[in-house]
Image (cartoon, rainbow, N blue to C red):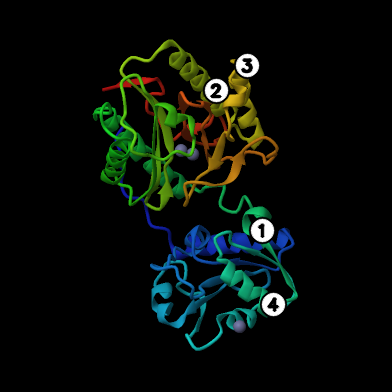
Amino acid sequence: MSEDVASPTPFTGEDYRARTRRVAAAATEEGLTGVLVTPGPDLVWLTGYHPTAITERLTLLALRADGDPVLVVPALERHDAEVAEGVTGMEVIDWSDASDPYLAVASVLPAEGTYGISDSAWALHLLGLQQHLPRAAYRSLSDAMPMMRAVKGPEELKRLAAAGAAADAAYEEILGVRFRGRRETDVAGDLADLLRRFGHEQVDFTVVGSGPNGADPHHEAGNRVIERGDAVVLDFGGLRYGYGSDTTRTVCVGEPDDELRRVHEVVLRAQEAGVQAARAGATCQDVDRAARTLIAKAGYGEAFIHRTGHGIGVTTHEPPYMVEGEEQPLLSGMCFSVEPGTYLPGRFGVRIEDIVTVTDGEAARLNNTDHGLAVVA
Ligand code: ZN
Ligand code: ZN
Ligand code: ZN
């Protein structure tokens, strides 16, 4: 597979307007008076605007159930905001440093009602809003509208596929580098360089969990020197064309022992079962159950200590989550990870992760490198 894809068609003002309209309508259905969006993934997705420096100065997009969107910005950033594709043509209100930004927001919003607010909003801003709209209530947007960004359009799927292909190319290259005798951070640096070389503009994480460190799913990379016989968990991703990649493979430095082979085989079958379960009409928890059942049957149920997957889009981790209790049905166009693992404290860990997209039939994998236990030098 080639990581070389034609750069995608940029999103247009009309694309962004369709999103703001859709979200405003969905908010009304959810019983919200409006949606308040501060800089971060929601704002990028709704407008294409990402302030270069996110500071204590308030930038806030208000989507009102009964009116057009309005963007409140610091006066000195008005120009930067207005050139964003999705902001062009939108009502923009600016505030100067000597004025009160929350008053500006309060002046354009109903004083009562319930607002959904971005998870990335600073406490500073939410407290300011609460002071100036004391009769309003607030809900986390991921709680009120967890599906807001979950179903991807064709142009978004192209970007996610391009990010996946680049991550795959990075994995194929990393198999050729030396592991033994180098620090985890050295291999992590190689992975970051490769992601950038294959087109990522942003690297979010490069996990290199060697030997016992692999048993800690949140271990990133440290000073441990990688040894012969180590299992090494490689989990890496970032953004390409503004959309995420996130893939994991577990490799072995030299020939693996029998237990590592056995555990790897179990995780591989669990991952395949999770992907098979990812079908329109099934639920998020069905994906988790399919993967977890196989690991539990093999006797490692206690060693699979995290959910099976998470959504991906303009961020590398977002709702919905493939976890017991999440009954959200899977819809065609949803994209998420399937990443079961088995973690044996003090010894090693194994995880295998692909991004998949739900289609009308079988889920399509956006990561297609070999899933086997690769032997590295
Ligand atoms: Zn004030
Ligand atoms: Zn990952
Ligand atoms: Zn992941």
Pointer 4 with pointer 1, Cβ within 8 A: no
Q: Label 2, on which residue? A: 270
Residues at circles 4 and 3 in contact by the CB criterion of under 8 Å: no
Q: CA distance from mark 4 to mark 1?
A: 23 Å
Viewer-closest of 64 and 105:
105
Q: Sequence-wise, which precedes: disc 1 or disc 3? A: 1
**Residue indicated by mark 3:** 297
> Nearer the N terminus, badge 2 or badge 1?
1
Mark 2 residue's CB less than 8 Å from ligand 3: no
Instruction: Estimate how packed mark 3 is, as few (under 14), some (14 to 19) or many (20 or more) residues with alpha carbons within 10 Å.
Output: few
> Which residue ends up furthest to the bottom in the rendered image?
98
Find numbered disc 3 in the image and state the secondary structure of the residue it sits on: helix
Mark 1 vs 3: CB contact within 8 A: no
Q: Give the CA separation, mark 2 to mark 1.
A: 35 Å
Q: Nearer the viewer, mark 2 or mark 1?
A: 2
Mark 2 is surrounded, within 10 Å at the Cα level, by few (under 14), some (14 to 19) or many (20 or more) other residues, namely many
Q: Which residue is mark 1?
A: 26
User: What amino acid type is highlighted by mark number 3?
Assistant: Lys
Q: Secondary structure at mark 4?
A: loop
Residue 225 sits above or below residue 81 on the image: above
